[in-house]
């Protein structure tokens, strides 16, 4: 079991209260940058290390672009929620799209028959590789991805 | 917030140096690929991509860079990334790109590395 990490120090006081940010993102090119701005603001508030923030940036970016890409053209928005403490980040990304059976989800091979890296299909692998917990639930009312990442 | 994407390029010692600024997504990736293709057609086979001002890169943008790596590999050339944000460096590692492309701290380091290869 990991020992408890020291709490972040913000303006001279230890921070152990989770901070949460909820955003509804419309289908607009590059809108994931708005979510990243919120993520980075929370991380600065809690004094999170730059390397952890950088990895979280990749996870969030991939989760949002995946949600818009795979939920179908009728999906007008994706909802994102970050809950962050000095120790952990939890990310929810929800769409109201057509959904799918997660059991049928297959990670594409990471190399082509020529031995080169595949061009597409990296989102899931990147999210899984950079996170500490990853769950997908999906049905007729949409898909939710829940990702946790240790920050200390 | 990350800037709208732009790039500059120059050819030094027959090496194409592309310096990006902003989010490398489908738009940024396509712009890099277009700039590469223009010089590739003219015979350039070694390319340096300086990502110092691109802290945010997504997998769709990277798909264009994989296409560049494929073309250079087939032509006996090489792509070298420089000035990588640590998170982008980690992303490229997960994607296995360093089996086919190089990485150097600076553009000058990349020019020296490519000089040794040719």
Image (cartoon, coloured by chain):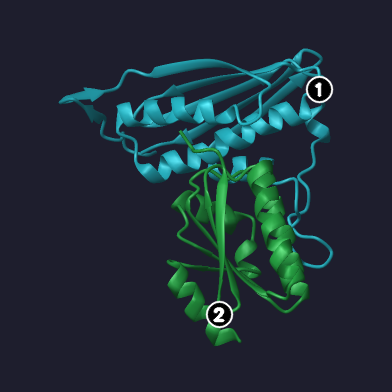
Chain colours: A cyan, B green
Q: Is residue A95 above or below residue B56?
A: above
For label 2, the crowd category at 10 Å Cα-Cα, with few meaning under 14, some 14 to 19 and many 20 or more, is few
State the quadrant of the C terminus of chain A: top left
Q: B100 or B17: nearer the eye?
A: B17
- Residue at disc 1, secondary structure: loop
Q: Is residue B52 above or below residue B82?
A: above
Q: A144 or B49: nearer the eye?
A: B49
Q: B10 or A145: nearer the eye?
A: B10
Does the image show residue A125?
Answer: no
- Residue at disc 2, secondary structure: loop
Return the x and y of residue A80 as percentages of the image width and height: 57, 20
Asked whether the residues under the numbered discs 2 and 1 touch, taking CB atoms below 8 Å apart as contact, a structural biologist would say no
Seen at 80% across and 22% down, the residue is: A99
Q: Is residue B45 above or below residue B18?
A: below
- Mark 2 and mark 1: Cα distance apart in space: 47 Å
Return the x and y of residue A38 as percentages of the image width and height: 45, 25
Residue B13 tag number: 2
What residue is disc 1 on? Answer: A73
Q: Report in which chain the residue with disc 1 lies.
A: A
Return the x and y of residue B65 as percentages of the image width and height: 67, 57
Seen at 61% across and 41% down, the residue is: A128
Q: Residue furthest left?
A: A12
Q: Report in which chain the residue with disc 2 lies.
A: B
The mark lying in front, picked from 2 and 1, is 2
For label 1, the crowd category at 10 Å Cα-Cα, with few meaning under 14, some 14 to 19 and many 20 or more, is few
């Amino acid at each position: 079991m990991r020992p408890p990490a020291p709490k972040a120090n913000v303006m001279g006081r230890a921070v152990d209260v989770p901070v949460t940010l909820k955003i509804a993102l419309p289908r607009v090119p590059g809108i994931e940058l708005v979510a990243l701005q919120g993520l980075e603001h929370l991380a600065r508030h809690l004094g999170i290390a730059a390397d952890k923030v950088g990895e979280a940036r990749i996870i969030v970016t991939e989760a949002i672009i995946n949600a818009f890409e795979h939920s179908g053209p009728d999906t007008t928005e994706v909802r994102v929620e970050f809950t962050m403490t000095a120790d952990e980040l939890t990310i929810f990304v929800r769409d109201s799209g057509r959904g799918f059976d997660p059991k049928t989800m297959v990670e594409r091979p990471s190399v082509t028959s020529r031995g080169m890296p595949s061009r597409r299909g990296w989102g899931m692998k990147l999210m899984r590789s950079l996170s500490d917990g990853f769950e997908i639930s999906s049905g007729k009312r949409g898909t939710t991805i829940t990702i946790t990442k240790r920050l200390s | 917030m990350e800037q709208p994407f732009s790039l500059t390029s120059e050819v030094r010692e027959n090496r194409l140096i592309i310096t990006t600024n902003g989010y490398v997504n489908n738009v940024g990736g396509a712009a890099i690929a277009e700039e590469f293709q223009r010089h590739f057609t003219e015979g350039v086979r070694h390319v340096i991509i300086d990502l110092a001002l691109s802290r945010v890169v997504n997998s769709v943008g990277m798909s264009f860079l994989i296409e560049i790596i494929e073309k250079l590999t087939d032509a006996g050339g090489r792509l070298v990334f420089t000035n990588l944000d640590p998170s982008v460096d980690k992303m490229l590692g997960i994607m296995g790109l360093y089996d086919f492309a190089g990485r150097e701290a600076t553009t000058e380091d990349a020019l020296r590395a490519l000089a040794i290869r040719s």
